[in-house]
Image (cartoon, grey):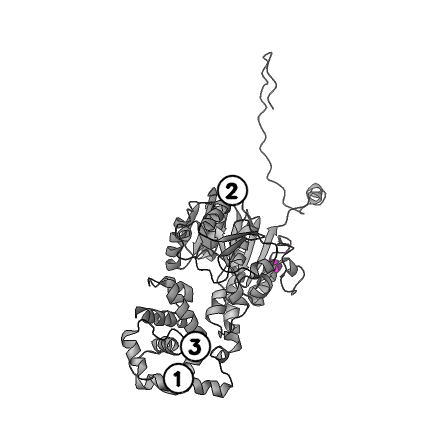
Amino acid sequence: MAVYAAAAAVLAGVESRQGSLKGLVYGSRFQNAKQLYALVCETQRYTAVLDAVISSAGLLRTEKKLRPHLAKVLVYELLLGRGFRGGGGKWKALLTRHQARLKAELARLKVQRGVSRNEDLLEVGSRPGPASQVPRFVRVNTLKTCSDDTIDYFKRQGFSYQGRASSLDDLRALKGKSFLLDPLLPELLVFPAQTDLHEHPLYQAGHLILQDKASCLPAMLLAPPPRSHVIDACAAPGNKTSHLAALLRNQGKIFAFDLDAKRLVSMATLLARAGVSCCELAEKDFLAVSPSDHRYRQVQYILLDPSCSGSGMLTRQLEEPRADTPSKERLHALAGFQKRALCHALTFPSLQRLVYSTCSICQEENEDVVQDALQQNPGTFRLVPALPSWPHRGLSTFPGAEHCLRASPETTLTGGFFIAVLERVEVPSSISQTKALVPGLIPSPVPKRKKRRRKPSTGPNTLPCK
């Protein structure tokens, strides 16, 4: 069956870092993406078990033309999955020759580890954890529709609407075809964890954006009003950009930058489907964007979500349960770029508010970056308390770090995330009043040109010119 070859190709792509598992599945053009995704996820979850069985059985030594990733998919299907019911073709014939040996090695592995169920063979890190319990968040794209109409649509499809959630327990209790309205974001719907809406007509028409709740917070906290000029510094894949456009109501301007040409092409497709018309895309390094360029003189809002380790991403936790934490060398390199990007963003002359965010749980990419930027800009910008009621705060690594917020599957039922909100410090009025008494305290304004005195009109019903 073609599904096995497609699954093997996705596994190879994940291993070579060509993309995320879900992105590779839905970019594969395989007709039944849901079936492919389930097969790849389960094969990946049992990868250590399958590697051990295949090695002990000598499968690859006997079948030299069988590629490792395809072998893993086939052995999963034979021993732990559907068992080639209703198909399999030549692969079924090939594996049947080794079936007895493979089953014997699986049984031997269970005896060695003292377990009786296949599930018990999984390592602790591969078993379903908090990440697998995170619900499916769906942002209603207010450029095309509204929450009330979307809720009515799902109700007509047989979904049970439970109203606005009041606690995380409400979200944990979601089952079947039920959904809630998020307690914090009025345009965010919440479905049970395993709900798949990739083929839903509202998603395909751009009325819905599949976006984790934590990923929705940066645009919400930046909160640019309509007609604002905004920079999205590292914009692809574009979900946050489309959210900014919705907040602007397509009135204003978004300058979106990214270096990856392929990601920008995908982003352009996403924005077009979402009805975004106020965004100017540029294949450009944000660090090369000049703050003195006249095009950006009105930019008062910047969203900076730079490249990071992705250590908090749900797809990483679900698809690569045994993935190691980033090396110190990689974290050092990433943090260096993130610090340069943040300090560069703070040099835009009209900037009033900036949101810095990452999908990382590493201090080096989060609190340390913000602390360094504030130290390099003393008295110019300050941390704003972001959602004080949010339960998960920044690590106490410097005074004020508690104003930042963090997110995680365990504490907020979202992906792992970090967000800091910075605002320009206003010059106190008392300082303005004393500038004449203390020369050089703040720059004196440019002297105004003297206006020519005009001769006032003398008509009976006119007032003197001012």
Between the C-alphas of marks 2 and 3, the distance is 49 Å
Q: Mark 3 or mark 1, which is nearer the start of the sequence?
A: 3
Disc 1 and disc 3 in contact, CB within 8 angstroms: no
Q: Check the image and report above or below for 10 versus 275.
A: below
Q: Nearer the viewer, residue 146 or 404?
A: 146
Secondary structure of residue under mark 1 = helix
x and y, in percent, of residue 399 in the image: 67, 61
Instruction: Inspect this view and state whether residue 293 appears.
Output: no
Is 186 colored magenta in this rendering? no
Q: Mark 2 or mark 1, which is nearer the start of the sequence?
A: 1
Q: Which marked residue is nearer to the observer: mark 2 or mark 3?
A: 3
x and y, in percent, of residue 8 in the image: 35, 72
Secondary structure of residue under mark 3 = helix
For label 1, the residue is 103
Q: Nearer the viewer, residue 114 or 220?
A: 114
Between the C-alphas of marks 1 and 3, the distance is 16 Å
Q: Residues within 10 Å of mark 2 (few under 14, many from 20)?
A: some
x and y, in percent, of residue 199 in the image: 39, 56
Extreme left residue here? 90
- Part of the protein shown in magenta: 374-379
Q: Nearer the viewer, residue 264 or 458?
A: 264
Disc 1 marks which amino acid?
A: Lys
Q: Which residue occupies 50% across, 63% down? A: 337
The quadrant of the picture occupied by the C terminus is top right
Secondary structure of residue under mark 2 = loop
For label 2, the residue is 226
Disc 3 marks which amino acid?
A: Thr
x and y, in percent, of residue 379 in the image: 64, 53
When asked about the image quadrant of residue 26, the answer is bottom left
Instruction: Inspect this view and state whether residue 52 appears.
Output: yes
For label 3, the residue is 47
Q: Residues within 10 Å of mark 3 (few under 14, many from 20)?
A: many
